[in-house]
Image (cartoon, rainbow, N blue to C red):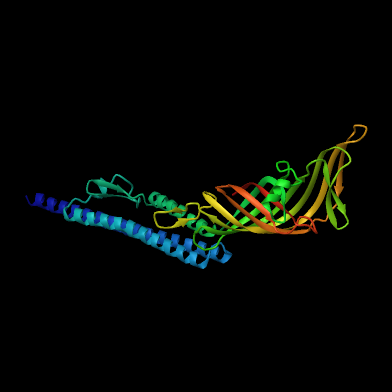
Amino acid sequence: MKRILLVLVLLCTTMAQSQEKTFEKEVIKISKRIEIITNQQKDSLKSKIIDIDKKLESGEISKETSETLKQEIAAYHARRIEKLVGEEERLLQLLVQDKTNGKIASSDNLSVAEGDDNTFTIGNKIFRLTLKDDDDDDKNDKKNTYNEVVNTSSRRTTTQFVFAMGVNNVLNNDQFSSLNDSDYKFWQSHFYELGWTWKTRFTENPSQLYFKYGVSFLWNNLRLEENKIHFKNGEFTEIQTYGNQLSESRLRHVQMNFPMHLEWDLSKNKTYDDGRVKDRTNNGVRLGVGGFVGFKLGTRQYLEYDDANGVAIEEVQYDNFNMNTVNYGLSAYLGYKSTSVYVKYDLNPLFKNTETRNISLGLRLDLN
């Protein structure tokens, strides 16, 4: 009987020691995981702050934006630590409760390797902490959000390729009624414009008011009615009837312009759940009002006719035809998304010693 009691005492002591040893091992594993969580989040925070400081030094973001980003990522990692460490504390409470109830598993009941710090057993349940995968998913979500904040803040200036085309004519003495007596063909006198613009928001935060500026090259064509040509007579340029029957009489002048506009872009901005606003442009109604200044690069007159022998003649006359070299004027456009109706009017005369001014109307494309 004594021998049986001795065996039972030894057995109970061995089981108790085994339980205490397993409990301590699980506590150590949880402590290690808490330490890993804390260090990982701190290292990640430090890396992102260094990256923000580099962007600040290079001028990609402003000081105000950098402080906002630092506060956001600090709050994010604080929430991550609170969430992940809270899960470990909950498991530790379950561990203590199971030890109190005598349900903690011995090392023989472990179905995973002892060295796996992410897998452990409490009672008859096996827990696997997928810290790496879960953290990567959240980190990727945050990385996407973080990059979007930087892009939104640094997108104060955008660029557009501009193409415009339409019809040309002239006004005399600033009178629209003079179009009725114009010497130029309305639908056959065309203009083409190619350029590049920059569109800068007036405020640091998203808004609807922009300053748009750039450079463009303009090809203006004016075709005369009724067999007429431009004739240079000293300091004056006259319109005269040509001796041969013309199939083409076109005056082309090429100029380089520097347009400037105030643009109201009514595109609807995107608002995120956290209150951040992403600026959107060229996605709604747009109105631009402004002007341009430039200079002429060259002028030519093209004449086509058949001579007395029926031979087709193409004649190109190189001269400035007393055109003003420097030109300036007003321009405006109104449209939706990238397409607009476009109007331009020169404030200075087309030819010296005249009150003839060029006017253009057409379609304009602003392509991001």
Residue 305 image point, x, y percent: 86, 37
Residue 355 image point, x, y percent: 75, 57
Question: Does residue 35 appear in this view?
Answer: no
Looking at the image, residue 50 sits to the left or right of residue 274; the answer is: right
- The extreme top residue here reads 310
- The extreme left residue here reads 1
Q: How many marks on residues?
A: 0
Residue under the point 23% across and 54% down? 94
Between residue 231 and residue 69, name the one nearer to us.
231
Question: Does residue 221 appear in this view?
Answer: yes
Residue 60 image point, x, y percent: 56, 62
Between residue 328 and residue 124, name the one nearer to us.
328
Looking at the image, residue 341 sits to the left or right of residue 131; the answer is: right
Residue 200 image point, x, y percent: 58, 59
Residue under the point 38% across and 50% down? 134
- The extreme right residue here reads 309
Looking at the image, residue 71 sits to the left or right of residue 293; the answer is: left
Between residue 22 and residue 363, name the one nearer to us.
363
Between residue 196 and residue 335, name the one nearer to us.
335
